[in-house]
Amino acid sequence: MREFHFEIMVEFYFKILPYLTITITYVFFSLLFGFLLGALTAYFRLSKNPVLKAISGAYITVMRCVPSIVFLFLVYYGLPGLMRTHFGIDMNDVDAIVYVIITFSIMLGAYTSEIMRSAYLSVDHGQFEAAVLVGMDSLTAFRRIIFPQALHAAIPNVGNIIIFMLKEGALAYIIGLQDVLGRGYYLNSLKANAYSMETYLALTLIYWPLTLLLEKAFRELEKRHSIAFLIQKKSSGKEVKA
Amino acid sequence: MIAIRNVKKSFGKLSVLQDVSLDIKEGEVVVILGPSGSGKTTLLRCISFLERASAGTIAFGDDVVDLKHASKKDILRTRRREGFVFQSYNLFANKTAFENVYEGLVSGRKVPKKEAKEKALEALDWVGLLDRKDYYPAQLSGGQQQRVGIARAVALEPEVILFDEPTSALDPELVGETLEVIKRVAKRGITMIVVTHEMSFAQDVADKIVFMDGGVVVEEGSPNDIFTHPKEERTKQFLKRIIGEFVYEI
Ligand SMILES: Nc1ncnc2c1ncn2[C@@H]1O[C@H](COP(=O)(O)OP(=O)(O)OP(=O)(O)O)[C@@H](O)[C@H]1O
Ligand SMILES: [Mg+2]
């Protein structure tokens, strides 16, 4: 087996690291648009309108059945043609990151809609009924009573979807985007692909702490948002006053 | 006076309420009895718009609201005349006992905060739970949760409170304390419609008993009329099944 070059790994690590901004950019925007699209889809899915229900249901099913990489290619190769013939828009100069964000926004739209829908359904409908019967309008009932509880129910899944996006987004290198993986790939290729081990270990050292941090943050968030935590806070607060 | 007129409700092909009418005088306690599936819950849900009736009206004085065609504004106005106590309490799980009552006053009825706070505390005190005001529903017994539910309804000072089997979900040993609190609501002169299977309670508090079966009002009258001289065969059958020989002892 070939010798492992620690110094190359370190060198690659620091050369790759600045490209994390690219990774974070597409993760952020994909999640942002994904959640907006997901909220709309969940709303349609929960509505009584059969047409909206069917459309959102079909969208979710299709997205669940297509591997991210296939969908990324579909968007990358299909969208420019579609835009040119139907809208007369030329996408030649559009940066690869735009395709990545479009792809994952659409994918996450489907995934997050399911997260939001199940979070919403996890709150007993009786509380909504009680809220409107004390005289709240439905929007207030949702905002004051349902949403905070649904949010709590959704926290672990939201954490997971962010981590999923962070990792799945690495596919972006395949359409030539210089994110962390793309950069690592490129650096290795400059050296005749002789340092694959070093490259991928450097990448692991970038992804790993980030994922770990996210996991920890969301676990803490979940805790701080739980009724058990509220109870604890209330009772310790009382002790201070007494 | 509250006048419920010609309420009909079907779920698909299943007709649950055939043509129900009911008058409730101010301060009156009306108890609805009837076998399971007779449409008691559905009636309460229709007059509070949790279900859309297929037909019918409810009138508070001369404010008549069409149960089928009511607008959002009509619904809100009608609901703000009503209080509702649920079989399964339906307390807001993310709010303390105090907040459960307070939230209804502030977000539901737009009562100013300071006044709402006083009212909420007073209502909790009145159901004997002032010392539990900072407890979350998860920390309260079923009976205590239901008492918070009652405080939540009473604090709103509605024109009528609807109770749907308020003690059916409770452990037997907690039924008594909850019924006591409901009796106190009745003594306060609040107009009430109570669906219950607690016969001796019904006899105690009711000014009027309404017996429903198969989506119609079969018979109504004073507790004495219904319990000792029921006219309709279906009423007799029902009472016999529920309380057996008790009927004849009265
Ligand atoms: N949302 C619904 N969809 C379809 N059918 C319903 C619905 N709600 C109630 N029903 C039916 O309507 C009938 C009356 O139900 P309802 O709950 O009003 O009876 P109830 O008198 O309150 O009975 P119980 O004493 O068991 O509470 C039942 O046959 C029930 O299955
Ligand atoms: Mg019922």
Image (tube, helix red, strand yellow):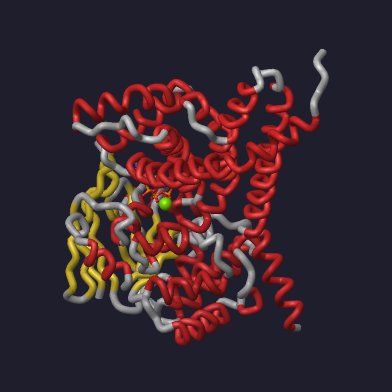
The x, y position of residue B165, in whole percent, is 47, 58
Q: Residue at 64% across / 24% down in the picture?
A: A188
The x, y position of residue B65, in whole percent, is 19, 65
Q: Is residue A168 above or below residue B238?
A: above
Q: Is residue B75 above or below residue A86?
A: below
Q: Identify which residue, A123 or B227, lies in the foreground.
A: A123
Q: Residue at 45% across / 78% down in the picture?
A: B155
Count of numbered marks: 0
Quarter of image, res B225 = bottom left
Q: Is residue B249 visible?
A: no
Q: Identify which residue, B176 or A231, lies in the foreground.
A: A231
Image-based side of B76 in relation to A232, left or right: left
Image-based side of B140 in relation to A57, left or right: right
Quarter of image, res A133 = bottom left
Q: Identify which residue, B231 or A15, lies in the foreground.
A: A15
Residue farthest toward the top in the current orientation of the protein = A1
Q: Residue at 64% across / 62% down in the picture?
A: B141
Q: Is residue B239 above or below residue B208?
A: above
The x, y position of residue A184, in whole percent, is 62, 30
Q: Residue at 56% across / 74% down in the picture?
A: B98
Q: Is residue A36 visible?
A: yes
Q: Identify which residue, A196 or B61, lies in the foreground.
A: A196
Is the N terminus of chain A in the top left, top right, bottom left or bottom right quadrant?
Answer: top right
Is the C terminus of chain A in the top left, top right, bottom left or bottom right quadrant?
Answer: bottom right
The x, y position of residue B221, in whole percent, is 32, 66
